Structures are given as structure tokens and as C-alpha cells.
Image (tube, helix red, strand yellow):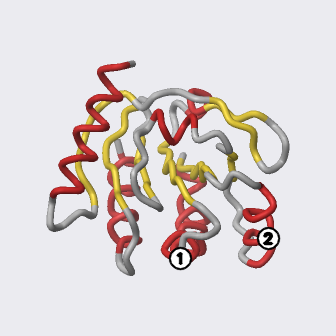
Amino acid sequence: MKASIRSLAAAGILACLSPLAGAEAINVPAPDFTLESRSGENLRLEDHRGEVVMLNFWASWCGPCRQEMPLMDELYSQYKDLGFTILAVNVDGNREAAHRFLDKVPVNYPILYDPESSVSELYEVQAMPTTVMIDRDGNARYIHYGYQPGYEDEYEQQIRELVRE
């Protein structure tokens, strides 16, 4: 587990130093976690083994997060029947801020809460949003830092690649 965290951290450092700090290709086991969802049930990453998972860390105060969430919902709707899901991890300390945002911009994919930032720390999240693409075998394959218009095209390309594997 520690080796995979170090690998994610190394990938993160490289991405931050890169002038094109969009996505970095990696191939390390994604650390497992369990978090409470908006529906009240506990969701575990390991339970999604066999699916392609887009793990997205976001906050209600994050402008780029607010911009990309409806676009991610479109990707979810388009690819969910092909073994793809999104787990969106909210890092707000107060769930009410997330609820207010989600009331205005509803999404159909699971929202998880990480109020203590334990999973964010596990994944060495340094920027909002941070998105990790996880393959069907549970390996983190791509990591994205931040969001700019057009990143959704890159997300879609990676989703297509991973659902075909």
C-alpha cells in the first residue's frame, strides 16, 4: 500500500512540474477506501472491481469542479451501461455546502463524503479537482489535476480505452 501511495505522489509531483499539467499516465494499485454516500450507504472502492471508475475529488467552493460536474454526468449517462462509474468524493468539511450545490446542479452518479480528508490524503490530493481513472483490475491508470474546458474529451478517450480492456 505504501509503495502505491508513493507512486501516486511521484506522479503528482511530476504532473505539477509539467507545463502540461493535465493528465499523467500511471499504473499502480488504487488504494482501497470506504466512505459514506449521499444516500447514506457506505461505498467501498473495492466493491467496484470489474468496473472502470472515475474517482473525482471535488469541493463546492471550487469553480472548476462546479464546471466539470455536469459534463461528468453526461459521461456517466453515456458509459454507465458499459461497466463505468463515477465516485465523486466531496472534501467540504460541511456537507450542507455540498448539498446546496447538488440541489442546484444534480448529478446521477454517487457522491461520497470525506469530511476528515482521509481519502484525499491517501490519494495525496493537492489540487481541486483531482480525477483518477481506475481500470477494471483496480489499478490507477491516469491522474488529472485541475480542470479546464476540453479535459472532458480526454476523460472520454480514457474511458473508452479502459472499458474496451
Contact between labelled residues 1 and 2, with CB atoms less than 8 Å apart: no
SS of the residue under disc 2? helix
The image quarter in which residue 94 lies? bottom right
What x and y, as percent, mark residue 74? 57, 71
Q: Is residue 28 left or right of residue 70?
A: left
Q: Which residue is drawn at the image coordinates 57% and 34% (left, top)?
A: 118
Q: Which residue is drawn at the image coordinates 32% and 66% (left, top)?
A: 154
Q: Nearer the viewer, residue 41 or 96?
A: 96
The image quarter in which residue 44 lies? top right
Dot 1: few (<14), some (14–19), or many (≥20) neighbours within 10 Å? few
Q: In the rendered image of this protein, does residue 94 appear above or below residue 83?
A: below
Q: Nearer the viewer, residue 34 or 46?
A: 34
Q: Is residue 127 left or right of residue 9?
A: right
SS of the residue under disc 1? helix
Numbered circle sitting on residue 63: 1
Amino acid type indicated by mark 1: Gly
What x and y, as percent, mark residue 84? 53, 50
Instruction: State the residue position of label 2.
Output: 100
Q: Which residue is drawn at the image coordinates 55% and 36% (left, top)?
A: 119
Report the Cα–Cα distance between label 2 and label 1.
Answer: 15 Å
Quadrant (top left/top right/bottom left/bottom right) for the N terminus = top left
Amino acid type indicated by mark 2: Arg
Q: Which residue is drawn at the image coordinates 35% and 57% (left, top)?
A: 144
